Amino acid sequence: MEKNKFDIITIGGSAGSIGVALILLKSLPEHFQIPIVLIIHRMKNITSQLNKLLAKELGIKEVVEPEDKEPIRAGIIYLAAQNYHLLVEQGNTFSLDYSEPVNFSRPSIDVSFESIARVYKHKTLAILLSGANKDGAAGLGRVIGEGGTAIVQSPETAEYPAMPKAAIDINPSVLIQSPEQTVHYLLNQITT
Amino acid sequence: MDENNSIHIKELDEILQMLLHRYGYDFSNYTKASLLRRVNRFAKETDSATAYDLKYKLLNSEPIFQLFLQEVTVNVTELFRDPAYYKSLREKVLPVLASYPIIKIWHAGCSTGEEVFSMCIMLHEAGLLKRARIYATDINPANLEKARSGIIPLAHMKEYTTNYLKSGGKNDFADYYSARYDHAIINEELRSQVIFSQHNLVSDNVFNEFQFISCRNVMIYFDKQLQDRVLQLFYDSLSSLGFLTLGLKETLLFSVVKDKFNNIHKTTKIYRRKD
Protein backbone atom coordinates (compact mmCIF):
# COMPACT_ATOMS: atom_id res chain seq x y z
CA MET A 1 0.00 0.00 0.00
CA GLU A 2 1.17 3.49 -0.83
CA LYS A 3 2.29 5.33 2.25
CA ASN A 4 0.24 8.41 3.18
CA LYS A 5 -2.11 8.42 0.25
CA PHE A 6 -3.43 11.76 1.53
CA ASP A 7 -1.67 14.90 2.78
CA ILE A 8 -4.80 16.35 4.36
CA ILE A 9 -8.22 15.22 5.53
CA THR A 10 -11.03 17.71 5.66
CA ILE A 11 -14.43 16.98 7.15
CA GLY A 12 -17.49 19.18 6.57
CA GLY A 13 -20.70 18.91 8.53
CA SER A 14 -23.75 20.75 9.68
CA ALA A 15 -26.79 19.70 11.72
CA GLY A 16 -26.34 16.18 13.06
CA SER A 17 -22.66 15.94 12.15
CA ILE A 18 -20.76 16.36 15.40
CA GLY A 19 -21.41 12.85 16.71
CA VAL A 20 -20.31 11.31 13.42
CA ALA A 21 -17.23 13.53 13.22
CA LEU A 22 -16.27 12.29 16.69
CA ILE A 23 -16.65 8.67 15.62
CA LEU A 24 -14.30 9.28 12.70
CA LEU A 25 -11.76 11.22 14.73
CA LYS A 26 -11.74 8.67 17.56
CA SER A 27 -10.91 5.96 15.05
CA LEU A 28 -7.69 7.64 13.95
CA PRO A 29 -4.41 6.13 15.07
CA GLU A 30 -2.80 8.01 17.94
CA HIS A 31 0.06 9.50 15.96
CA PHE A 32 -1.48 10.28 12.61
CA GLN A 33 0.90 12.31 10.45
CA ILE A 34 -1.40 14.60 8.50
CA PRO A 35 -3.47 17.68 9.31
CA ILE A 36 -7.22 17.33 9.76
CA VAL A 37 -9.48 20.29 9.07
CA LEU A 38 -13.07 20.38 10.34
CA ILE A 39 -15.63 22.77 8.93
CA ILE A 40 -18.73 22.60 11.10
CA HIS A 41 -21.60 25.07 10.85
CA ARG A 42 -22.32 26.85 14.09
CA MET A 43 -24.52 29.67 15.31
CA LYS A 44 -23.14 33.06 14.40
CA ASN A 45 -23.47 35.19 17.50
CA ILE A 46 -23.28 32.66 20.26
CA THR A 47 -19.73 31.98 21.30
CA SER A 48 -19.23 28.27 20.92
CA GLN A 49 -16.78 26.13 22.83
CA LEU A 50 -16.88 23.37 20.24
CA ASN A 51 -13.09 23.16 20.00
CA LYS A 52 -12.83 22.54 23.75
CA LEU A 53 -15.72 20.10 23.70
CA LEU A 54 -14.15 18.09 20.88
CA ALA A 55 -10.74 18.05 22.56
CA LYS A 56 -12.33 16.77 25.76
CA GLU A 57 -14.28 14.07 23.94
CA LEU A 58 -11.18 12.98 22.06
CA GLY A 59 -8.97 13.12 25.13
CA ILE A 60 -6.39 15.33 23.41
CA LYS A 61 -4.76 18.57 24.50
CA GLU A 62 -6.38 20.82 21.95
CA VAL A 63 -8.39 21.20 18.82
CA VAL A 64 -7.00 24.31 17.19
CA GLU A 65 -9.07 27.13 15.72
CA PRO A 66 -6.47 28.43 13.28
CA GLU A 67 -5.61 32.10 13.16
CA ASP A 68 -4.75 33.99 10.02
CA LYS A 69 -1.44 32.84 8.40
CA GLU A 70 -1.01 29.99 10.88
CA PRO A 71 1.15 27.23 9.34
CA ILE A 72 -0.70 23.96 8.74
CA ARG A 73 0.93 21.22 10.80
CA ALA A 74 0.65 17.47 10.60
CA GLY A 75 -0.97 15.62 13.48
CA ILE A 76 -3.18 18.55 14.46
CA ILE A 77 -6.98 18.67 14.35
CA TYR A 78 -8.15 22.10 13.22
CA LEU A 79 -11.65 23.51 13.52
CA ALA A 80 -12.76 26.43 11.34
CA ALA A 81 -13.46 29.43 13.59
CA GLN A 82 -16.94 30.85 13.84
CA ASN A 83 -17.89 33.60 11.46
CA TYR A 84 -14.92 33.41 9.06
CA HIS A 85 -14.37 31.37 5.93
CA LEU A 86 -11.28 29.20 6.30
CA LEU A 87 -8.95 28.90 3.30
CA VAL A 88 -5.49 27.51 2.68
CA GLU A 89 -2.72 29.11 0.69
CA GLN A 90 0.15 27.71 -1.36
CA GLY A 91 2.96 27.17 1.12
CA ASN A 92 0.52 25.51 3.48
CA THR A 93 -0.73 28.26 5.70
CA PHE A 94 -4.31 29.05 6.64
CA SER A 95 -5.92 32.30 5.67
CA LEU A 96 -9.25 33.73 6.75
CA ASP A 97 -11.94 35.57 4.89
CA TYR A 98 -14.84 37.60 6.24
CA SER A 99 -16.73 38.03 3.00
CA GLU A 100 -20.43 37.24 2.63
CA PRO A 101 -21.80 33.89 3.80
CA VAL A 102 -21.95 31.21 1.07
CA ASN A 103 -24.98 28.90 1.20
CA PHE A 104 -26.03 30.99 4.22
CA SER A 105 -22.92 29.71 5.93
CA ARG A 106 -19.72 31.23 7.24
CA PRO A 107 -17.59 29.19 7.48
CA SER A 108 -18.78 27.65 4.25
CA ILE A 109 -17.76 24.06 3.53
CA ASP A 110 -17.67 24.80 -0.21
CA VAL A 111 -15.18 27.62 0.27
CA SER A 112 -12.82 25.49 2.39
CA PHE A 113 -13.08 22.34 0.26
CA GLU A 114 -12.38 24.28 -2.95
CA SER A 115 -9.44 26.07 -1.44
CA ILE A 116 -7.95 22.91 0.09
CA ALA A 117 -8.38 21.02 -3.21
CA ARG A 118 -6.62 23.80 -5.11
CA VAL A 119 -3.52 23.45 -2.94
CA TYR A 120 -3.47 19.75 -2.00
CA LYS A 121 -4.85 18.41 -5.34
CA HIS A 122 -4.97 14.59 -5.47
CA LYS A 123 -3.64 14.36 -1.92
CA THR A 124 -6.96 15.68 -0.58
CA LEU A 125 -9.49 13.52 1.22
CA ALA A 126 -12.77 15.36 1.82
CA ILE A 127 -15.63 13.89 3.83
CA LEU A 128 -19.10 15.43 3.92
CA LEU A 129 -21.47 14.55 6.76
CA SER A 130 -25.05 15.17 7.85
CA GLY A 131 -26.64 18.57 7.34
CA ALA A 132 -29.78 20.39 6.34
CA ASN A 133 -28.61 22.52 3.41
CA LYS A 134 -26.49 22.04 0.30
CA ASP A 135 -23.15 23.40 1.43
CA GLY A 136 -20.22 21.17 0.47
CA ALA A 137 -21.68 19.77 -2.75
CA ALA A 138 -19.82 22.12 -5.08
CA GLY A 139 -16.68 21.84 -2.94
CA LEU A 140 -16.64 18.06 -3.30
CA GLY A 141 -16.96 18.57 -7.06
CA ARG A 142 -13.81 20.63 -6.90
CA VAL A 143 -12.00 17.98 -4.83
CA ILE A 144 -12.85 15.35 -7.45
CA GLY A 145 -11.90 17.73 -10.27
CA GLU A 146 -8.45 18.14 -8.75
CA GLY A 147 -7.99 14.38 -8.47
CA GLY A 148 -8.74 14.11 -4.76
CA THR A 149 -11.04 11.67 -3.00
CA ALA A 150 -14.56 12.58 -1.87
CA ILE A 151 -16.65 10.64 0.63
CA VAL A 152 -20.27 11.41 1.51
CA GLN A 153 -22.08 10.01 4.53
CA SER A 154 -24.83 7.75 3.22
CA PRO A 155 -28.10 9.68 3.53
CA GLU A 156 -29.88 6.83 5.33
CA THR A 157 -27.32 7.00 8.15
CA ALA A 158 -27.45 10.81 8.38
CA GLU A 159 -29.63 12.56 10.92
CA TYR A 160 -30.20 15.29 8.31
CA PRO A 161 -29.82 13.74 4.85
CA ALA A 162 -30.26 16.90 2.72
CA MET A 163 -26.59 17.84 2.57
CA PRO A 164 -25.31 14.36 1.66
CA LYS A 165 -28.09 14.01 -0.93
CA ALA A 166 -27.27 17.36 -2.56
CA ALA A 167 -23.62 16.32 -2.86
CA ILE A 168 -24.45 12.89 -4.29
CA ASP A 169 -26.84 14.45 -6.82
CA ILE A 170 -24.23 16.60 -8.47
CA ASN A 171 -21.20 14.34 -7.95
CA PRO A 172 -21.89 10.83 -9.29
CA SER A 173 -18.37 9.64 -8.50
CA VAL A 174 -18.34 10.30 -4.74
CA LEU A 175 -17.89 7.36 -2.39
CA ILE A 176 -21.08 6.89 -0.37
CA GLN A 177 -20.31 5.34 2.99
CA SER A 178 -21.84 4.75 6.39
CA PRO A 179 -19.73 6.13 9.28
CA GLU A 180 -18.53 2.56 10.00
CA GLN A 181 -17.35 2.15 6.41
CA THR A 182 -15.54 5.48 6.58
CA VAL A 183 -13.80 4.42 9.79
CA HIS A 184 -12.64 1.27 8.00
CA TYR A 185 -11.54 3.31 4.99
CA LEU A 186 -9.53 5.72 7.15
CA LEU A 187 -7.78 2.90 8.98
CA ASN A 188 -6.65 1.50 5.66
CA GLN A 189 -5.40 4.81 4.27
CA ILE A 190 -3.85 6.56 7.22
CA THR A 191 -0.45 5.44 8.31
CA THR A 192 1.43 6.81 11.25
CA MET B 1 -13.36 21.69 -13.96
CA ASP B 2 -16.54 23.25 -12.66
CA GLU B 3 -17.93 26.31 -14.39
CA ASN B 4 -17.80 28.44 -11.26
CA ASN B 5 -14.08 28.78 -11.52
CA SER B 6 -13.19 29.84 -15.03
CA ILE B 7 -10.14 31.86 -14.01
CA HIS B 8 -6.99 30.19 -12.77
CA ILE B 9 -4.19 31.41 -10.60
CA LYS B 10 -1.82 32.20 -13.48
CA GLU B 11 -4.48 34.18 -15.29
CA LEU B 12 -5.27 35.99 -12.06
CA ASP B 13 -1.66 37.17 -11.88
CA GLU B 14 -1.91 38.54 -15.42
CA ILE B 15 -5.10 40.41 -14.58
CA LEU B 16 -3.47 41.89 -11.48
CA GLN B 17 -0.44 43.06 -13.48
CA MET B 18 -2.74 44.75 -15.97
CA LEU B 19 -4.69 46.52 -13.19
CA LEU B 20 -1.47 47.81 -11.66
CA HIS B 21 -0.34 49.34 -14.96
CA ARG B 22 -3.72 50.66 -16.00
CA TYR B 23 -5.14 51.95 -12.70
CA GLY B 24 -2.25 51.96 -10.23
CA TYR B 25 -3.89 49.53 -7.79
CA ASP B 26 -1.56 46.75 -6.71
CA PHE B 27 -3.29 43.54 -5.62
CA SER B 28 -0.28 41.32 -6.18
CA ASN B 29 0.22 40.74 -2.45
CA TYR B 30 -3.39 39.90 -1.65
CA THR B 31 -3.93 36.30 -0.53
CA LYS B 32 -4.50 34.26 -3.64
CA ALA B 33 -7.11 31.78 -2.43
CA SER B 34 -9.48 34.43 -1.25
CA LEU B 35 -8.87 36.85 -4.13
CA LEU B 36 -9.29 34.15 -6.77
CA ARG B 37 -12.65 33.27 -5.31
CA ARG B 38 -13.92 36.82 -5.46
CA VAL B 39 -12.48 37.51 -8.91
CA ASN B 40 -14.25 34.41 -10.18
CA ARG B 41 -17.48 35.58 -8.62
CA PHE B 42 -17.04 38.95 -10.33
CA ALA B 43 -16.33 37.25 -13.66
CA LYS B 44 -19.56 35.34 -13.33
CA GLU B 45 -21.56 38.46 -12.44
CA THR B 46 -20.20 40.33 -15.43
CA ASP B 47 -20.77 37.37 -17.78
CA SER B 48 -17.07 37.08 -18.46
CA ALA B 49 -16.60 33.53 -19.69
CA THR B 50 -12.80 33.63 -19.82
CA ALA B 51 -9.95 35.50 -18.19
CA TYR B 52 -9.36 37.25 -21.50
CA ASP B 53 -12.95 38.44 -21.50
CA LEU B 54 -12.64 39.86 -18.00
CA LYS B 55 -9.29 41.46 -18.75
CA TYR B 56 -10.72 43.14 -21.83
CA LYS B 57 -13.63 44.61 -19.88
CA LEU B 58 -11.46 45.83 -17.02
CA LEU B 59 -8.92 47.36 -19.36
CA ASN B 60 -11.46 49.26 -21.42
CA SER B 61 -14.00 50.39 -18.87
CA GLU B 62 -13.19 52.38 -15.78
CA PRO B 63 -16.74 51.98 -14.39
CA ILE B 64 -16.27 48.21 -14.58
CA PHE B 65 -13.01 48.58 -12.71
CA GLN B 66 -14.78 50.61 -10.02
CA LEU B 67 -17.30 47.80 -9.70
CA PHE B 68 -14.45 45.33 -9.54
CA LEU B 69 -12.85 47.31 -6.73
CA GLN B 70 -16.15 47.27 -4.87
CA GLU B 71 -16.58 43.52 -5.32
CA VAL B 72 -13.13 42.13 -4.75
CA THR B 73 -12.26 44.19 -1.70
CA VAL B 74 -14.38 42.77 1.09
CA ASN B 75 -16.77 45.32 2.53
CA VAL B 76 -18.66 43.29 5.07
CA THR B 77 -18.88 45.14 8.38
CA GLU B 78 -21.17 45.58 11.36
CA LEU B 79 -21.86 47.89 14.29
CA PHE B 80 -20.30 46.54 17.50
CA ARG B 81 -19.14 43.38 15.77
CA ASP B 82 -17.56 41.07 18.38
CA PRO B 83 -19.06 42.60 21.52
CA ALA B 84 -16.26 41.12 23.64
CA TYR B 85 -13.77 43.27 21.76
CA TYR B 86 -15.70 46.45 22.51
CA LYS B 87 -16.06 45.41 26.12
CA SER B 88 -12.26 45.16 26.40
CA LEU B 89 -11.89 48.54 24.74
CA ARG B 90 -14.21 50.07 27.31
CA GLU B 91 -12.39 48.46 30.20
CA LYS B 92 -8.74 48.43 29.17
CA VAL B 93 -8.15 51.02 26.47
CA LEU B 94 -10.48 53.99 26.94
CA PRO B 95 -9.29 54.70 30.52
CA VAL B 96 -5.73 55.00 29.15
CA LEU B 97 -6.75 57.12 26.17
CA ALA B 98 -8.55 59.43 28.60
CA SER B 99 -5.17 60.64 29.87
CA TYR B 100 -4.30 62.35 26.57
CA PRO B 101 -5.43 65.93 25.93
CA ILE B 102 -6.04 65.11 22.26
CA ILE B 103 -6.81 61.51 21.41
CA LYS B 104 -5.66 60.55 17.94
CA ILE B 105 -7.21 57.48 16.37
CA TRP B 106 -6.78 55.76 13.01
CA HIS B 107 -9.27 53.27 11.63
CA ALA B 108 -7.38 51.67 8.74
CA GLY B 109 -9.56 49.87 6.20
CA CYS B 110 -12.76 51.37 7.60
CA SER B 111 -15.02 50.13 4.79
CA THR B 112 -18.45 51.80 5.12
CA GLY B 113 -17.72 53.10 8.61
CA GLU B 114 -19.64 50.81 10.97
CA GLU B 115 -16.65 50.13 13.25
CA VAL B 116 -15.80 53.83 13.28
CA PHE B 117 -19.33 54.72 14.36
CA SER B 118 -19.15 52.07 17.09
CA MET B 119 -15.93 53.64 18.38
CA CYS B 120 -17.53 57.11 18.27
CA ILE B 121 -20.42 55.85 20.40
CA MET B 122 -17.99 54.41 22.94
CA LEU B 123 -15.92 57.60 23.06
CA HIS B 124 -19.11 59.60 23.48
CA GLU B 125 -20.21 57.44 26.41
CA ALA B 126 -16.80 57.80 28.04
CA GLY B 127 -17.01 61.59 27.63
CA LEU B 128 -13.99 61.56 25.29
CA LEU B 129 -15.48 62.20 21.88
CA LYS B 130 -14.88 65.95 21.83
CA ARG B 131 -11.17 65.41 22.46
CA ALA B 132 -10.86 62.72 19.79
CA ARG B 133 -9.55 63.17 16.24
CA ILE B 134 -10.50 60.11 14.25
CA TYR B 135 -8.98 59.42 10.84
CA ALA B 136 -10.84 56.70 8.99
CA THR B 137 -9.29 55.48 5.76
CA ASP B 138 -10.08 52.97 3.06
CA ILE B 139 -8.77 52.02 -0.36
CA ASN B 140 -12.19 52.31 -1.92
CA PRO B 141 -13.73 55.75 -2.68
CA ALA B 142 -17.26 54.28 -2.90
CA ASN B 143 -16.97 53.00 0.67
CA LEU B 144 -15.77 56.36 1.91
CA GLU B 145 -18.68 58.13 0.27
CA LYS B 146 -21.12 55.81 2.04
CA ALA B 147 -19.26 56.19 5.32
CA ARG B 148 -19.37 60.00 5.11
CA SER B 149 -23.13 59.90 4.68
CA GLY B 150 -23.50 58.13 8.02
CA ILE B 151 -26.27 56.03 6.52
CA ILE B 152 -26.44 52.33 7.23
CA PRO B 153 -29.04 49.70 6.31
CA LEU B 154 -31.69 49.19 8.98
CA ALA B 155 -32.00 45.46 8.32
CA HIS B 156 -29.51 44.33 10.95
CA MET B 157 -30.22 46.96 13.61
CA LYS B 158 -31.74 44.43 15.98
CA GLU B 159 -28.53 42.41 15.89
CA TYR B 160 -26.45 45.57 16.30
CA THR B 161 -28.51 46.57 19.33
CA THR B 162 -27.88 43.17 20.90
CA ASN B 163 -24.17 43.52 20.13
CA TYR B 164 -24.14 46.95 21.76
CA LEU B 165 -25.80 45.68 24.92
CA LYS B 166 -23.43 42.71 25.10
CA SER B 167 -20.48 45.08 24.80
CA GLY B 168 -21.58 46.71 28.05
CA GLY B 169 -23.59 49.55 26.53
CA LYS B 170 -26.13 50.95 28.96
CA ASN B 171 -28.02 53.50 26.90
CA ASP B 172 -30.95 53.23 24.55
CA PHE B 173 -29.20 52.35 21.29
CA ALA B 174 -32.00 53.89 19.24
CA ASP B 175 -30.98 57.31 20.57
CA TYR B 176 -27.85 57.14 18.41
CA TYR B 177 -29.58 57.07 15.03
CA SER B 178 -32.72 58.14 13.21
CA ALA B 179 -34.50 55.50 11.19
CA ARG B 180 -36.27 56.27 7.97
CA TYR B 181 -37.69 53.68 5.56
CA ASP B 182 -35.11 50.93 5.38
CA HIS B 183 -32.12 52.98 6.49
CA ALA B 184 -30.74 54.59 9.60
CA ILE B 185 -28.54 57.64 9.85
CA ILE B 186 -26.04 57.84 12.70
CA ASN B 187 -26.42 61.14 14.61
CA GLU B 188 -24.26 63.81 13.07
CA GLU B 189 -22.88 64.86 16.42
CA LEU B 190 -21.39 61.39 16.88
CA ARG B 191 -19.64 61.63 13.51
CA SER B 192 -18.37 65.19 13.95
CA GLN B 193 -14.81 64.22 14.92
CA VAL B 194 -14.22 61.82 12.03
CA ILE B 195 -12.29 62.58 8.86
CA PHE B 196 -12.78 59.98 6.12
CA SER B 197 -10.09 59.87 3.47
CA GLN B 198 -8.54 57.55 0.94
CA HIS B 199 -5.40 55.66 1.93
CA ASN B 200 -4.02 52.51 0.37
CA LEU B 201 -2.19 50.30 2.85
CA VAL B 202 -0.34 48.67 -0.04
CA SER B 203 1.35 51.83 -1.28
CA ASP B 204 0.78 54.81 1.05
CA ASN B 205 2.85 55.77 4.07
CA VAL B 206 2.76 57.26 7.54
CA PHE B 207 0.62 60.41 7.62
CA ASN B 208 0.24 61.19 11.33
CA GLU B 209 0.93 59.86 14.81
CA PHE B 210 -1.75 58.01 16.75
CA GLN B 211 -2.38 56.60 20.19
CA PHE B 212 -4.78 54.04 18.85
CA ILE B 213 -4.95 52.21 15.53
CA SER B 214 -7.67 49.75 14.66
CA CYS B 215 -7.32 47.51 11.62
CA ARG B 216 -9.68 44.60 12.08
CA ASN B 217 -10.17 41.89 9.47
CA VAL B 218 -8.40 43.88 6.78
CA MET B 219 -4.99 42.23 6.71
CA ILE B 220 -6.48 38.74 6.44
CA TYR B 221 -6.70 39.51 2.73
CA PHE B 222 -2.96 40.28 2.52
CA ASP B 223 -0.11 37.82 2.18
CA LYS B 224 2.58 37.67 4.83
CA GLN B 225 4.92 40.03 3.04
CA LEU B 226 2.29 42.74 2.73
CA GLN B 227 1.10 42.14 6.29
CA ASP B 228 4.63 42.79 7.49
CA ARG B 229 4.80 46.03 5.52
CA VAL B 230 1.50 47.25 6.94
CA LEU B 231 2.36 46.22 10.50
CA GLN B 232 5.65 48.12 10.26
CA LEU B 233 3.64 51.11 9.00
CA PHE B 234 1.35 50.84 12.03
CA TYR B 235 4.31 50.54 14.38
CA ASP B 236 5.84 53.67 12.86
CA SER B 237 2.49 55.48 13.09
CA LEU B 238 1.90 54.72 16.77
CA SER B 239 3.11 56.91 19.56
CA SER B 240 5.01 55.30 22.39
CA LEU B 241 2.79 52.76 24.22
CA GLY B 242 0.09 53.21 21.57
CA PHE B 243 -2.57 50.55 20.96
CA LEU B 244 -3.13 48.36 17.91
CA THR B 245 -6.23 46.21 17.61
CA LEU B 246 -6.84 43.35 15.16
CA GLY B 247 -9.67 40.97 14.33
CA LEU B 248 -10.36 38.10 16.72
CA LYS B 249 -8.56 35.53 14.56
CA GLU B 250 -5.67 37.75 13.53
CA THR B 251 -2.35 37.64 15.31
CA LEU B 252 1.07 39.29 15.40
CA LEU B 253 2.58 35.91 16.24
CA PHE B 254 3.78 35.21 12.70
CA SER B 255 4.83 38.79 11.90
CA VAL B 256 8.06 40.82 11.95
CA VAL B 257 6.76 43.13 14.69
CA LYS B 258 5.78 40.42 17.15
CA ASP B 259 8.50 41.37 19.63
CA LYS B 260 7.63 45.05 19.50
CA PHE B 261 4.15 44.66 20.99
CA ASN B 262 2.59 43.21 24.12
CA ASN B 263 -0.71 41.45 23.78
CA ILE B 264 -2.64 43.06 26.61
CA HIS B 265 -5.82 41.09 26.09
CA LYS B 266 -5.29 37.78 24.39
CA THR B 267 -8.71 36.79 23.12
CA THR B 268 -9.72 40.19 21.81
CA LYS B 269 -6.38 40.93 20.14
CA ILE B 270 -5.55 44.25 21.72
CA TYR B 271 -1.83 44.96 21.35
CA ARG B 272 0.27 47.74 22.82
CA ARG B 273 3.58 49.11 21.60
CA LYS B 274 6.30 48.12 24.05
CA ASP B 275 8.43 51.23 23.76
Image (cartoon, grey):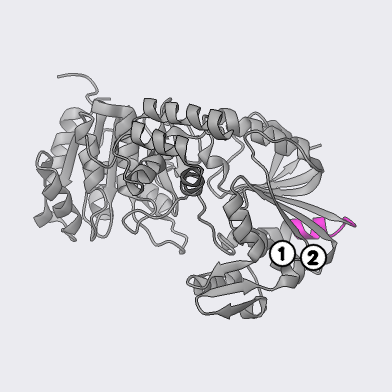
Characterize the local packing of mark 1: few (<14), some (14-19) or many (20 or more) Cα atoms within 10 angstroms: many
At horizontal 39% and vertical 55% (from top left) the residue drawn is A101
In-image side of B90 versus A83 (left or right):
right
At horizontal 63% and vertical 31% (from top left) the residue drawn is B228
Q: Check if mark 1's residue and mark 2's residue have beta carbons within 8 Å.
A: yes
At horizontal 36% and vertical 42% (from top left) the residue drawn is B43
Secondary structure of the residue carrying numbered label 2: helix
Hey, which residue is sitting farthest front in the picture? Answer: B60
Q: In x, y percent, where is residue A27? A: 23, 40
In this rendering, the answer to whether A9 lies above or below B125 is above
Callouts 1 and 2 on one subunit: yes
Residue B129 marker: 2
The answer to whether residue A118 is visible is yes
In this rendering, the answer to whether B161 lies above or below A22 is below
In-image side of B258 versus A45 (left or right):
right
Query: Looking at the image, which is closer to me, B162 or A103?
Result: A103
- Residue B226 falls within the magenta-colored stretch: no
Q: Which residues are magenta?
A: B93-101
Characterize the local packing of mark 2: few (<14), some (14-19) or many (20 or more) Cα atoms within 10 angstroms: many
Which image quarter holds the N terminus of chain B?
top left
Residue B120 marker: 1
Chain under numbered label 1 = B
